[in-house]
Image: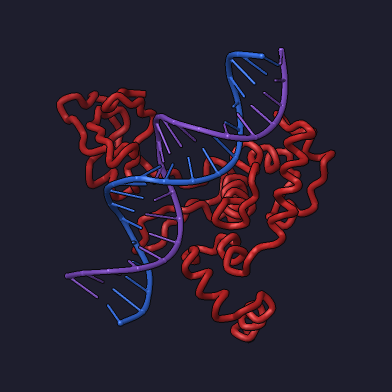
Chain colours: A red, B blue, C purple
Amino acid sequence: SVLVGGVTVTNATLHNEDEIRRKDVRVGDAVVVRRAGDVIPEVVRVLPEKRPPAASAFVMAATCPVCGSQVVRQQDEAVARCSGGLYCPAQRRQALLHFASRRAMDIEGLGERLVEQLVEHDVVRTPADLYRLGLLALVQLERMAEKSAGNLLLAIERSRQTTLARFIYALGIRNVGEATARDLARHFGSLDRLLAADEAQLL
DNA sequence: TGAGCCGTCCAAATGCGCAC
DNA sequence: GTGCGCATTTGGACGGCTCA
């Protein structure tokens, strides 16, 4: 951690692998960090005069550190992704977090720590599993007593009453954000018609 | 009861794909 | 080329809750 403008910074973004190469950032380098906006810390440049002799170049991992699946980077894309899909616990966690987020299904109380536990204990594998959760399973978890468990179950129940647009957005399909989800919902009108359109496309 | 934990929200910047 | 939408990044404030 370092102090930048009176704020402790523990991590700073470098955007992607290409950016690391463009700025020639190596492991062990001293760097200049600036705050973009209120809080976002950004690595601006390297201080070459402070580079340790043993500084090594960054090498992107070939396999996912969580599930061991191959790391794939499509041609013309900047991002490298784990190819494990929902088999990968890290991807499962993020899918659940996105599903529950306020702008998606808005399940209050389902945050990072709780999702972490649900995935770790294999209680929840897909978002659909959330709707099969019971009080007994929840109160086994850390920092989850009856009050919290009850509140969470209520929030999950409430989320059943949602809009088609929110549901589509909650699925976490790449390149389908809120605006696209709204467009799809407006165009198809119902989930059945959307699914039917999908099947018609496959035939 | 109070300390500490947890979840949520927000800010600005940037990369990228795509439509026009 | 421009504009839009999506995704992602981090720290701090705040309210609700758990637990010793």
**Residue at the extreme left:** A49
Whether residue A138 is situated above or below residue C3 in the rendered picture: above
Q: Quadrant of the N terminus of chain A?
A: top left
Where is residue A147, by image quadrant? top right
Residue A152, x across and y down, in percent: 72, 43
Q: Nearer the viewer, residue A61 or A42?
A: A42
Whether residue A35 is situated above or below residue A93 in the rendered picture: above
Name the residue rendered at 59%, 48% in the picture: A97
Residue A22, x across and y down, in percent: 23, 47
Q: Quadrant of the C terminus of chain A?
A: bottom right
Name the residue rendered at 29%, 39% in the picture: A42
Whether residue C3 is situated above or below residue A83 in the rendered picture: below
Name the residue rendered at 32%, 37% in the picture: A41
Q: Nearer the viewer, residue B12 or A168?
A: B12
Residue A130, x across and y down, in percent: 73, 51
Whether residue A199 is situated above or below residue C16 in the rendered picture: below
Name the residue rendered at 51%, 52% in the picture: A82
Where is residue A59, by image quadrant? top left
Q: Nearer the viewer, residue A159 or A117?
A: A159
Q: Is residue A76 left or right of residue A177?
A: left
Q: Is residue A115 left or right of residue A52?
A: right
Q: Is residue A46 left or right of residue A124?
A: left
